[in-house]
Amino acid sequence: MADIKLFDEYPILVDRVLATILGLNEAIVLQQVHYWLVNNEKNNINFKNGRYWTFNSMKKWREETFPFLGMDALRRAFGNLEKKGILITGNFNQKGYDRTKWYTIDYQKLYSMRCNNSFGGNHTMHLVETNKCNCGKPINAFTENHTTNTRDYTEI
């Protein structure tokens, strides 16, 4: 029997329900952005406008985090999450010419998508540790004590 070797490095985990609702690449990207947001909160860095943020260029995201995705697939995944209003972008760079995007997650939008998904069934999204969506009030230690600075756009 051949030796099986798994996870010499930290794996990227993906929730099946999240991948079903958003798409596999989008779920992978969102999970990693969430990881960095939680990491930044623990280290109390990149807190802007009432939210924690993470940043990277597409080239760095691909090289350092998503080498298994093509650049077009990666851009599409980020773009789809932005269009759905789940991934919020900003620019907090100190240099005017620096166009590196900063990212944060609209957890309320994500939870409302879960609660209004077209797949039916009684799925539970485990996004933050074992916290669950209760379709009205997100139970999420990351967002519960922070105000949001987003606007509701009915056309989204």
Image (cartoon, rainbow, N blue to C red):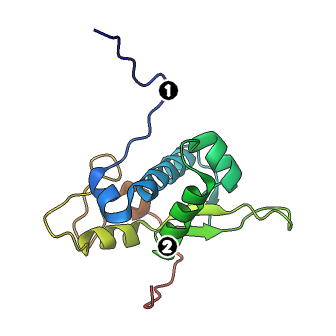
- Disc 2 target residue: 148
Q: Is residue 7 above or below residue 65?
A: above
- Residue ID at (20%, 69%): 119
Residue 126 circle label = none
Q: Which mark is residue 9?
A: 1
Residue furthest to the top:
1
Q: Say above or below: 140 vs 82.
A: above
Q: Work out whether residue 9 or residue 130 is closer to the camera in this orientation and state it.
A: 9
**Residue 57 quadrant:** bottom right
Q: Which quarter of the rendered picture does the C terminus lie within?
A: bottom left
Element under disc 1: loop
Specify the amino acid type for callout 1: Glu
In the rendered image, the quadrant that contains the N terminus is: top left
Q: Earlier in the sequence, mark 2 or mark 1?
A: 1
Q: Nearer the viewer, residue 53 or 66?
A: 66
Horizontal side, residue 81 vs residue 116: left or right = right
Residue 14 in the image: above or below residue 57:
above
Q: Is residue 82 visible?
A: yes
Image spot of residue 112 (x, y percent): 31, 73
Residue 12's spot in the image, x, y percent? 44, 40
- Name which residue type carries label 2: Thr
Q: Would you call the spot at circle 1 few (<14 residues within 10 Å), some (14-19), or many (20 or more)? A: few
User: Along the horizontal axis of the image, is 89 left or right of 132?
Assistant: right
SS at circle 2: loop
The answer to whether residue 49 shows anywhere in this view is no
Report crowding for label 2: few under 14, some 14 to 19, many 20 or more residues within 10 A (C-alpha): some
Q: CA distance from mark 2 to mark 1?
A: 34 Å
Q: Position of residue 143 (x, y in %)?
A: 42, 62
56 left or right, relative to 69 = right
Identify the residue shown where x is 14% and y is 63%. 122
Count numbered badges in the picture. Answer: 2
**Looking at the image, which residue is at 28% across and 70% down?**
137
